[in-house]
Image (tube, rainbow, N blue to C red):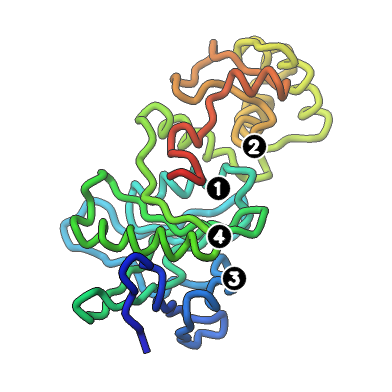
Amino acid sequence: MVQQAAAGGESAGIEAAFATAAGQVTQLPWDQAAAVQFEDLAPVSAFPVVPGRRWGPGWWWSATTGRHVVHGSAAMRTQLVILDRDPDVTGLSARPVRLLWRDADGRVRSWVPQLFARYADGTGLLADCPASPAAGGDRAQRARVVLEAACARVGWSYRRLEPPPAVVAANLRWLAGYRHPRYQGTPRLRAALAEAFAEPRPLADGAAAVGDSLQVLPAAYHALWCGHLRTPLDEPLHERTLICADAERGAGVEKRLSDVGGDRENG
C-alpha cells in the first residue's frame, strides 16, 4: 500500500516496484528496496515506440559491464556513453525501478527514472536524460523533488542529466567506437603509447613514433576512452590534438566530464 508523502518529507511513504532477476514483480518500501542490485535488473517498463519519431529504442554495449543496456532516445544514449566512461561507475541499467507515492491530494503518483548507475563506493544514481531542461513538463519537475529526497534518504542521488556540448558529445561518440577491449593492443604497444605521450604531443606525431598508424591509432583511441591517455574533449579531435599520458599533466589537459554534466553530489 502506497502511503502519502509527508509535507516537508517528500521521501516518506515511497515504495519501489521492480522485476526481480527471476521475473517476479515485487513492491517494497523504498528504504528496503535501496538494497536491491538494480544494476542487474531488466527494465520494469519498456521504452515506447512512437510512430513517426526519428529515434526509437536501441541497445548500448557497456564497456563497464560487458552487457547491453537499452536506451530510448539519443539523449539517453549520450548519457550512457558518459557514464560508461566514468571509472567510478561499476554498473548500469535502464528503467529498473518504478517509484510510487501519494501526493497531497491522496492521488497515487509514479515515476520510472531512465537510468541507474552503481558507483564503486556502493552508492547509486537514479537519472533522467531530458533532451532539454523543460522536457517532461511540470510532472517531471514534481517527480524530481520527490526523487531527490528519496535518494538523499538512502545516500544516493537523483539527477536530470543535461546534454553535453555538441563537440564533447561528438568526441565521445568517436572514442566510444573503440571502447571494446579488442582495440587496446598488446602490452608492448600500450607501453609504447605511454612512453610516446609522456609529454603533451600531437596525436599524429606520437602515433608515428610508435609504429604503423593502422595498428597504433585504434589503441590510442581506446586509451583515450579509458583515460590512460588524455586530451581536451571540448575541442574537436584531429591529428594535431595534444595528447598526454602523464596522470598529473593529463589532469590539466583533459577537462573533467563532471564539469560538463554537473557535479555528482550537487547535481
Task: Name the residue that disc number 2 marks.
Answer: 226
Verify CB contact (< 8 Å) between mark 3 and mark 1.
Answer: no
Sequence-wise, the earlier of marks 1 and 2 is 1
The N terminus lies in which quarter of the figure?
bottom left
Q: Nearer the viewer, residue 218 or 99?
A: 99
Q: Nearer the viewer, residue 11 or 200?
A: 11
Element at badge 2? Answer: helix
Give x and y (percent) for residue 209. 73, 12
Q: Quarter-wise, where is residue 141 in the image?
A: bottom left
Q: Disc 1 and disc 2: Cα gap in Å?
A: 10 Å
Which residue is painted at 55% across and 78% down in the image? 32
Name the amino acid type tagged 1.
Asp
Q: Quarter-wise, where is residue 91 in the image?
A: bottom right
Left or right of residue 35: residue 97? left
Task: Name the residue that disc number 1 marks.
Answer: 84
Give x and y (percent) for residue 79. 43, 46
Element at badge 3? Answer: loop
Task: Name the residue that disc number 3 marks.
Answer: 37
Give x and y (percent) for residue 85. 57, 42
Which residue is painted at 83% across and 29% down in the image? 188
Sequence-wise, the earlier of marks 3 and 1 is 3
Sequence-wise, the earlier of marks 1 and 4 is 1
Verify CB contact (< 8 Å) between mark 2 and mark 4.
Answer: no
Task: Name the residue that disc number 4 marks.
Answer: 155
Q: Disc 3 and disc 4: Cα gap in Å?
A: 15 Å
Give x and y (percent) for residue 162. 36, 42
Residue at the front extreme of this rendering: 8
Mark in the foreground, 3 or 1? 3
Q: Disc 1 and disc 4: Cα gap in Å?
A: 21 Å
